[in-house]
């Protein structure tokens, strides 16, 4: 069941169309990747959820109803433009955000301590934010979005600026939240991370959804297949119809084949031309699906 | 829930501002105490006990009653000490050195130094003339009663106008009211403006607006900074009035309790009005560097009221323009308390100005609220007033539908 729904959102800023026809939804426990090139309208769409942008047409609803302040207080948000109070102590500001999101002081205190412990920042609780490293400030920003155990988590470019360890930690937390039934929507340009984390994505371009659905299905729907073969003699591959060599190294070749591929005949040709130690056929990666979608 | 959120916002502002608030309060109290001490020292003529003491030199056969006669003619709080000097030369030396204010030689000569107190001179001349008159009257065979009725006839004096001293005190009070109102409104209004600008430039406001309505955020800020301002003004005002009364300063304006209360009321009204304007101004900028120029332009509004008030009150006339200024909400906080101090404002004028101010506050908070809403929601761009107002109206109450 979809809880958060964007329904035919349209928004213009003067001559610029930020959202043309944006419709999609997020269900509880779902981790949805929200993709698009720069200026596609991702941030504008996200900001409509929090009342920071009012659409010219269309609706954003939660459980089928318009979103108001009480609903927003149950959501977690990590804006693209990071920002916290630089001169305020870490613990004080997390307590503040928790209480703004309707937690009483005792619960807010417990939650603050729990999350600081979880991210290994308990010893920095009394530090001012500006005294923390960039990575730790990012962690505090994420805690601020999680502190009140939100039912919906919206993160705009959460992996931007994170080192591999930080990104892995962030990914683990998001997976954990989704597993507990939280609806998670996040935008990202790091498509490999999205592919690892999400089952489904929505791709928008020029304010309109151009592709959406399960990543596996979107990849499978592509007419292109990549075939990677390792063997002694690979000269036969140049005779393959509709094949384009993508990568070639001694004893290994990777080709792209557009159109229908008869896997059995291909395998038969390969074995007839000598020993084959590896034969892989796969659909294109998400990055290629994305590029095709936004360039179409 | 709304009150809880406003309270949380206000509490955070107070928490963050605790240190600067304590420091500025300490500085203000120290400055006020220093000013009062200087006033006390000046008024007491360095005597250290709150009184003025004159040194009078005596040479030769000075009438024995003269010192008591002079002392009886001095104002309250002024004392007289006498110094016996051996010769005219010694007297001139003492006068040159400033050891004595005047010297009486025998019963008919007075020597002045380069500077002489008018009070001492008048008392001394009157006393010598009175002694001489008594002496001559006695020679004519007049009784002491006759002499008394000649020198001190029974006359009745009644004042039908305000005493000069009271008018002077009222003038001081009205000027103080203008300065205090202007300084308070400017300081705390700008505090709000910079706080909003800092919140917007750090981008934290976008996170907060996910949970808090812009007008609740604005209200919390206004409450917190306003309460700090009121506390500081009350503390400094209590120190000035309390110290002034305890030290019995001669020039201490006769501050009625009513005027102090009116000043606090007008501070609250003026601060709320201007605080909303400064908050809206702060919401237009992208970073705190821009804030000084945007807020600097806004300063012109209270400065007009301040300059007009100071000039007009020093001229001592309740002009039609002053009456108009004291009713216009932009400048009423700077001018109406002064008119109250002078006793010029009629009750209906005070009532009308308060009512107009309340209407203006309602209107400006609505206007500034829209600007603030539109301004803070566009964190990445600098906006004009009209653009921010339209953006705020576009967002509407409750944000996106």
Image (cartoon, rainbow, N blue to C red):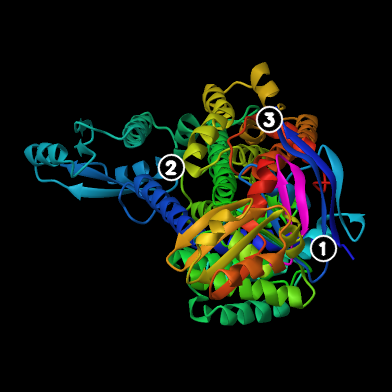
Label 2 vs label 1, nearer the camera: 1
Which residue position is annotated with label 2? Answer: B75
**Residue B222 picture location, percent across and down:** 67, 50
| Label 1 crowd (10 A; few <14 / some 14-19 / many >=20) | few
Residue A146 on the magenta segment: no
Residue at (55, 39) in percent of width and height: B186
Tell me the subunit letter for badge 3.
Answer: B
Residue at (78, 36) in percent of width and height: B393
Label 2 vs label 3, nearer the camera: 3
Q: Are marks 3 and 1 on the same chain?
A: yes
Residue furthest to the top: B320
The answer to whether residue B259 is seen in the rendering is no
Q: Secondary structure at mark 1?
A: loop
Alpha carbons under labels 2 and 3: distance apart: 67 Å
Which residue position is annotated with label 1? Answer: B1
Residue furthest to the left: B89
**Residue B224 picture location, percent across and down:** 64, 56
Residue at (10, 39) in percent of width and height: B93
Residue situated in front as seen by the camera: B256 or B24: B24
Which stretch is magenta? Answer: A198-213
* Image quadrant assignment for residue B386: top right
Left or right of B49: which side holds B318? right
């Amino acid at each position: 069941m979809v809880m958060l729904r964007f329904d035919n959102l349209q928004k213009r800023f003067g001559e610029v169309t930020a959202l043309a026809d944006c419709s999609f939804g997020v269900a509880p426990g779902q981790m949805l990747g929200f993709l698009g090139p720069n200026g596609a309208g991702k941030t504008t769409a996200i900001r409509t959820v929090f009342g920071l942008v009012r659409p010219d047409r269309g609706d954003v609803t939660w459980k089928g109803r318009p979103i108001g302040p009480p609903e927003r207080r149950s959501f977690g948000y990590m804006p693209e433009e990071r920002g916290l109070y630089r001169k305020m102590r870490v613990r004080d500001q997390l307590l503040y955000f928790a209480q703004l999101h309707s937690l009483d002081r005792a619960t807010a205190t417990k939650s603050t301590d729990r999350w600081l412990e979880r991210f290994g920042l308990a010893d920095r609780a009394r530090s001012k934010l500006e005294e923390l490293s960039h990575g730790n400030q990012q962690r505090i920003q994420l805690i601020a979005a999680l502190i009140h155990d939100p039912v919906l988590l919206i993160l705009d470019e959460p992996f931007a600026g994170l080192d591999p360890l930080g990104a892995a930690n962030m990914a683990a937390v998001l997976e954990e939240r989704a597993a507990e039934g939280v609806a998670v929507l996040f935008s990202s340009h790091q498509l490999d991370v999205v592919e690892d984390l999400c089952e489904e994505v929505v791709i928008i371009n020029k304010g309109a959804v151009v592709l959406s659905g399960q990543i596996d299905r979107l990849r499978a729907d592509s007419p292109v297949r990549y075939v990677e073969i390792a063997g002694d003699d690979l000269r036969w591959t140049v005779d393959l119809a509709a094949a384009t060599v993508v990568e070639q190294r001694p004893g290994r070749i990777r080709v792209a084949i557009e159109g229908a591929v008869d896997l059995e005949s291909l395998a038969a040709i390969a074995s007839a031309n000598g020993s084959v130690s590896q034969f892989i056929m796969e659909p294109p990666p998400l990055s290629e699906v994305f590029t095709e979608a936004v360039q179409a | 829930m709304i009150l809880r959120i406003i309270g949380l916002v206000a509490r955070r502002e107070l928490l963050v501002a605790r240190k600067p608030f304590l420091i500025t309060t300490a500085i203000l109290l120290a400055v006020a105490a220093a000013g009062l001490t200087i006033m006390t020292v000046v008024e007491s003529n360095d005597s250290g006990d709150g009184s003025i003491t004159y040194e009078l030199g005596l040479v030769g056969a000075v009438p024995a009653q003269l010192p008591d006669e002079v002392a009886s003619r001095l104002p309250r709080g002024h004392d007289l000490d006498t110094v016996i000097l051996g010769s005219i030369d010694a007297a001139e030396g003492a006068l040159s050195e400033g050891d004595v204010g005047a010297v009486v030689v025998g019963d008919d000569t007075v020597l002045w130094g380069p500077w002489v107190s008018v009070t001492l001179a008048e008392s001394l001349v009157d006393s010598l003339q009175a002694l001489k008159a008594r002496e001559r009257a006695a020679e004519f065979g007049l009784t002491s009663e006759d002499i008394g009725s000649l020198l001190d006839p029974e006359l009745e004096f009644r004042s039908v106008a305000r005493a000069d001293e009271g008018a002077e005190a009222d003038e001081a009070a009205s000027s103080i009211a203008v300065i205090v109102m202007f300084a308070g409104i400017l300081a705390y209004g700008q505090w709000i403006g910079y706080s909003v600008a800092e919140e917007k430039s750090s981008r934290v406001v976008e996170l907060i607006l996910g949970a808090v309505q812009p007008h609740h955020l604005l209200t919390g800020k206004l409450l917190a900074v306003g309460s700090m301002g009121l506390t500081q003004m009350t503390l400094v005002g209590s120190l000035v009035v309390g110290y002034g009364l305890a030290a019995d300063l001669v020039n201490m304006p006769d501050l009625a309790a009513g005027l102090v209360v009116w000043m606090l009321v007008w501070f609250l009204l003026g601060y709320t009005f201007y605080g909303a304007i400064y908050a809206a101004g702060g919401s237009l900028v992208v970073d705190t560097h821009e804030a000084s120029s945007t807020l600097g332009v806004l300063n012109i509004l209270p400065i007009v009221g301040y300059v007009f008030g100071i000039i007009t009150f020093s001229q001592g006339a309740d002009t039609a323009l002053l009456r108009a200024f004291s009713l216009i909400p932009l400048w009423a906080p700077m001018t109406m308390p002064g008119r109250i101090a002078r006793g010029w404002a009629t009750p209906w004028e005070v009532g009308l100005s308060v009512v107009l101010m309340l209407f203006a506050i309602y209107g400006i908070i609505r206007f500034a609220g829209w600007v603030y809403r539109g301004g803070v929601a566009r964190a990445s761009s600098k906006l004009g007033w009209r653009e921010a107002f339209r953006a705020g109206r576009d967002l509407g109450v409750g944000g996106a539908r």
